[in-house]
Image (cartoon, grey):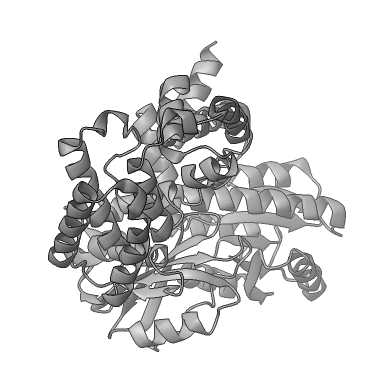
Amino acid sequence: MYRVVIVDDEPWALIGIRKLIESSGNRFKIICETTEPAIALEVICEERPDVVFTDIRMPNISGIELMKRTRAQGGDVDFIVISGFAEFSYVQHALQEGAMDYQLKPLDMEKAKEMLDKLYRKLENKRSTNDLSFYISLLEEFKDNQSLLSTRLRHLPYKRYQVVTLYFKSAEYDDVVLLELGTKAQLTTLKLGPKKCVFIINSDEDQSELIYRSLTSKEDVVDRAGISLSSDGADHVSMLLKTSDIASNDCFVDRSKRISQYSKGKKSHVKQFAEQIIEALERVQYKTMKDMTTVITAFFSANSLGIEDAVFLWNEIVMHTLKYSETSSRLLDFEFLDYSEMKEKFMNLETLSEYVFEQLSYPERDQLGDANNKFKELLLYTNKNFHEELFLKDLSTKFFINVSYCCELFKKVTGMTFSQYMTDLRMKKAIELLQNSNLSIADVCKSVGYSDYFYFNKVFKRNLGCTPSKYRKTSGDMNALN
């Protein structure tokens, strides 16, 4: 929800603009409407709204002067001018000062609604780019995070910081009133995906209890969330961002853990368990290993383990299997993963466990049937639905192909593992959209099947050598030359 200031010296005009904004649903929130430009300027400087609707001719401070003074204060605000004057000089002057649009009174509601849609798309694009850049900067080591955070804080900083990573059930959500915090607290909100937000909380005390209470009371909009521990000083914000994101994925292990506070992984405990699993894999025939699925899930539940522990267990098994197993040459989709990659590869801990043992229990050739024909159907389905959440385990079941043989077919037919193939499909589509559409980076991210801007940005840079925004700019420059 974007925050709006309306200023017009005619009260009836304020009413018309308010009705227009309210007609757009929950995209915008009016934080101030006034007939006094001086009051509007004060609110703009203190509250840093996203957009200002202003008349152009007002007593004392004109709309043009309001824009100039806002820019002089360093305010990054979009302006929409709504005026009764159609003279070209007014329009030209407003646009020169950076106004996004110029609408005439009385408002043509159809044109005004088109303008609001355009404004919303621009704000979404700007926000996704700015928030992602800000988030990445905070994650970098040796940054002056306090100075960086001060650009977003509205008041002098308190001593403590805490982070909440939250996923909403719907892309249409209100991130302004979600968290109810103490009086000595301020919030920085970063939108990092169609349904993902990160909240950086700066306060004078640990807010965990209030955060948890707020989130549990909003089960109708909150899908899952991770809460970091509270820490003194901005130097720890990078760590808090990482740990809250990890905690937000603990539902991978247990769906009931929708709201989870980060706790350090129990590596030594999990390592002992991994050794038992590996020993069982070495001694027991694979056909009897299906029971181990319930053993893994029960172990995680009994020890209150999270996704960080699941990643450690997986990587221990992969390391052993690739190093010692005679069958490692055909375990084509066994690769080391971090928690983000694990979420892309598996739906949950149970499917991970099933996958391990089905991969290792390789079928006899006479049991494969018409798997090759079924694989062609699977490939067509994947090519058509790559923007959806797809997992190899589910696809192999859907098309009646043993999962380990499915892995072999992917390598044989496409030259890539399933994970590599999915990434390749999504990156090709992302390139096409970046080159040939005006979609925002956020919309491109969503269109190719990613729910997290940061992860999309990371995967794109790893595969193409630059970020999506830089790729679009470079591609645009090259097209201009041609």
Residue visible at 48% across and 42% down?
A: 392
Q: In this view, does 154 lie above or below 280?
A: below
Q: Position of residue 425 (x, y in %)?
A: 51, 30
Is residue 470 in view from this perspective? no
Q: Is residue 229 above or below residue 275?
A: below
Q: Position of residue 420 (x, y in %)?
A: 41, 32
Q: Position of residue 191 (x, y in %)?
A: 48, 58
Give the camera-side residue of 450 and 155.
Answer: 450
Q: Is residue 107 above or below residue 86?
A: below
Residue visible at 59% across and 39% down?
A: 399
Specify the quadrant of the image occupied by residue 444. top right
Is residue 208 in view from this perspective? yes
Give the camera-side residue of 139 and 368.
Answer: 368
Indicate left or right for 462 with 51 as reference: left
Residue visible at 64% across and 49% down?
A: 121
Give the camera-side residue of 305 and 435.
Answer: 305
